[in-house]
Image (cartoon, rainbow, N blue to C red):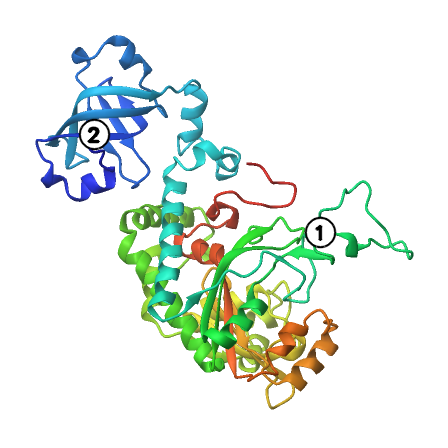
Amino acid sequence: MKRQTIKDLLADYKKVLHHDITVQGWVRAFRSNRFIALNDGSTINNLQIVVDFESFDEETIKKINTASSLKIVGEVVESQGAGQTVEIIAKKITILGDNFFEELQSTILQPKKHSLEKLREQAHLRFRTNVFGAVFRIRHSVSFAIHSFFNQNQFFYINTPIITGADAEGAGEMFGVTNFDLNNMPKTEEGEIDFSQDFFGKKTNLTVSGQLEGETAAMGLGRIYTFGPTFRAENSNTTRHLAEFWMIEPEVAFNNLENNIDLAEDFLKYVIQYVLDNCKDDLEFLDKRFEEEQKSKPEKDRAKEGLIEKLQNVVAKRFKRVSYTEAIEILLNSKENKKGKFQYPIEKWGTDLQSEHERYLVEKHFETPVVLFDYPKEIKAFYMKLNDDGKTVAAMDVLFPGIGEIIGGSEREARHDVLLEKMKDFGVDEHELWWYLDTRKFGSVPHAGFGLGLERLVLFVTGMTNIRDVIPFPRTPKNAEF
């Protein structure tokens, strides 16, 4: 007898009504030695199993408890009780895995008795809770929608290196990769580590971005995107930072800054709409959780919209496009800035915006997603196109409510001489990046791209507040369990 997922059964139960089927899953609750709430991970909804204890031996009934796993054969019937449309009358119960620590596990799995922090330490139980089941089903849908969007728009998926000799951002904070015996590393005559003897013959790191390699592919394939793990050795324990995270980076030949902004807006709206269309039950659960969470906050800090309403509004509204210069004027003249309410006061043009400034623009001033563009050249990366004013670069950041920056990108500097000069200004080694400079020698074209952190987007879509809660196995300072 073919096993059916609970999601499929609940969605189309009339096909199997009054037929025997097989289901398998984990026990969420067992009431009155009669009603089992079974969940198999395919949906947030449980399936009710009705047990006639007179038809089963006492030992089997005793072994059924929270978190144990079961295989059940039974008849699908319409439910007479409240709370569910359909249920299964059990005819055969097979216990696949006993719960040896019922008291401990049932405590951790009860929503009122655990914390999200505690569940990060329990990898084997974390995915069985409603919160994390919903989050990671949505994370899957977001990932699927990303690939779907790019495939529909004739982009090619490129795998860029995880191990690289290039620092795309020129900002350091990279994890080194070596094959050396750390207790006996060869040194040069000057006493420095001799990387010429290492596996790759040079100093290498885990990548912070696939962008530079992606640009080389776009120069031949036209439209490409990367989707892979990236790493940053920033010793930060905030709710916004991870040492290992996933990045999506499209790169498009012949695109300018305006095309890049259009692509970013279309892309975000497509992915969010896909989640709205395909994750209804999980979103409704997280929407209620979000509402309860807001009640515990001071009134001035509460979100103006519910989770689902917020997602619908992002899809419906056109993103407001604002130059950095205009944004600085708005912030300089804001009551928050004049009354000293910003943690980082805005004093002049050229200031690097912080999350509080970005959120002010989105949540208080414009009340819609915002795209900032044309930033001062000093606060952006070396590869961004220098504008005709000589002061700004063709950069763009997409800002979302509750998150701040969710996408960062730019039109790239396609002129060989200008790029070379900018690399010198930023202290970027032109010999290390000879291959990147060469993309500007052989038929260089205007091109643009951006980077989206997957976890930032999942954080926004699920309404969670800590980025560690939207990645299956968070990697943070002093934490590399599992």
Amino acid type, mark 2: Thr
Point out residue 372 in the picture as x, y percentages from the top left corner.
51, 76
Residue under the image location 31 percent in, 13 percent down: 62
Residue situated in front as seen by the camera: 466 or 415: 415
Between the residue at mark 2 and the residue at mark 1, the CA separation in whole angstroms equals: 53 Å
Name the disc covering residue 9, or none: none
Residue situated in front as seen by the camera: 327 or 95: 95
Q: Secondary structure at mark 1?
A: loop
Residue under the image location 44 percent in, 50 percent down: 464
Residue situated in front as seen by the camera: 152 or 58: 152
Residue under the image location 64 percent in, 51 percent down: 236
Name the disc covering residue 22, or none: 2
Amino acid type, mark 1: Phe
In the shown orientation, is residue 400 left or right of residue 34? right
Name the disc covering residue 199, or none: 1
Please identify the quadrant where the N terminus is shown: top left
Q: Earlier in the sequence, mark 2 or mark 1?
A: 2
- Res 46 → quadrant: top left
- Please tell me how crowded label 1 is: few (under 14), some (14-19), or many (20+) other residues with Cα within 10 Å: few
Point out residue 173 in the picture as x, y percentages from the top left corner.
69, 57
Residue situated in front as seen by the camera: 239 or 47: 47
